[in-house]
């Protein structure tokens, strides 16, 4: 049995991108800790919190459903301890 233990904090580019109406966001945590995965619109308003709280070490995948949002550029931010990563995605309807 093969066990993949992440060695670093990683936030991958969402797939597919551009997307309509949903996309997958993957991230890896090298150690257990508190996280917050948040989606923002192009003017910086928070539109969704996909995950928040204590997570164990490992690899995660979350589906973001933007059915009720307009087309445009969005940003997703993952906070983990003192680390922060932000990436851009595009919703095309």
Image (spheres, helix red, strand yellow):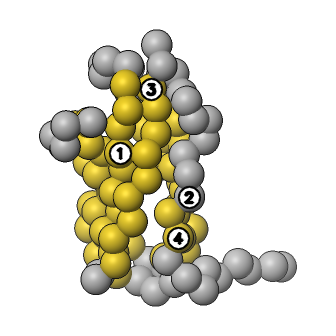
Crowdedness of circle 1 by 10 Å Cα count: few (<14), some, many (20+)? some
Q: Residue 75 bears which disc, if any?
A: 1
Quick check: can you spot residue 54? no
Alpha carbon distance from label 2 to label 4: 6 Å
Looking at the image, the residue that sits furthest to the right is: 1
Q: Position of residue 85 (x, y in %)?
A: 39, 65
Figure check: 25 above or below 28: above
Q: First in sequence, mark 2 or 3: give its number.
A: 2
Write down the residue under mark 4: 10
Crowdedness of circle 4 by 10 Å Cα count: few (<14), some, many (20+)? some
Alpha carbon distance from label 4 to label 1: 16 Å
What SS does tag 4 mark? Answer: strand
Q: First in sequence, mark 2 or 1: give its number.
A: 2
The total of numbered circles placed on residues is 4
What SS does tag 2 mark? Answer: loop
Please tell me which residue is depicted at 38% across the width and 73% down the height of the picture: 55
Looking at the image, the residue that sits furthest to the left is: 45
Q: First in sequence, mark 1 or 3: give its number.
A: 1
Write down the residue under mark 2: 12
Q: Position of residue 71 (x, y in %)?
A: 38, 19
Residue 33 lies left or right of residue 44; in this view the side is: right
Q: Position of residue 48 (x, y in %)?
A: 25, 41
Q: Mark 2–mark 4 contact, CB under 8 Å? A: yes
Q: Position of residue 38 (x, y in %)?
A: 29, 51
């Amino acid at each position: 049995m093969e066990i993949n233990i992440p060695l670093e904090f990683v936030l991958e580019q969402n797939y597919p991108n551009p997307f309509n109406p949903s996309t997958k966001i993957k991230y890896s945590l090298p150690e257990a800790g508190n996280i917050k995965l948040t989606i923002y619109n192009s003017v910086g308003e928070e539109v969704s919190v996909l995950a928040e709280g204590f997570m164990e070490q490992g690899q995660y995948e979350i589906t973001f459903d933007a059915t009720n949002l307009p087309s445009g550029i969005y940003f997703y931010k993952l906070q983990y301890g003192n680390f922060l990563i932000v990436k851009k995605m595009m919703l095309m309807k």
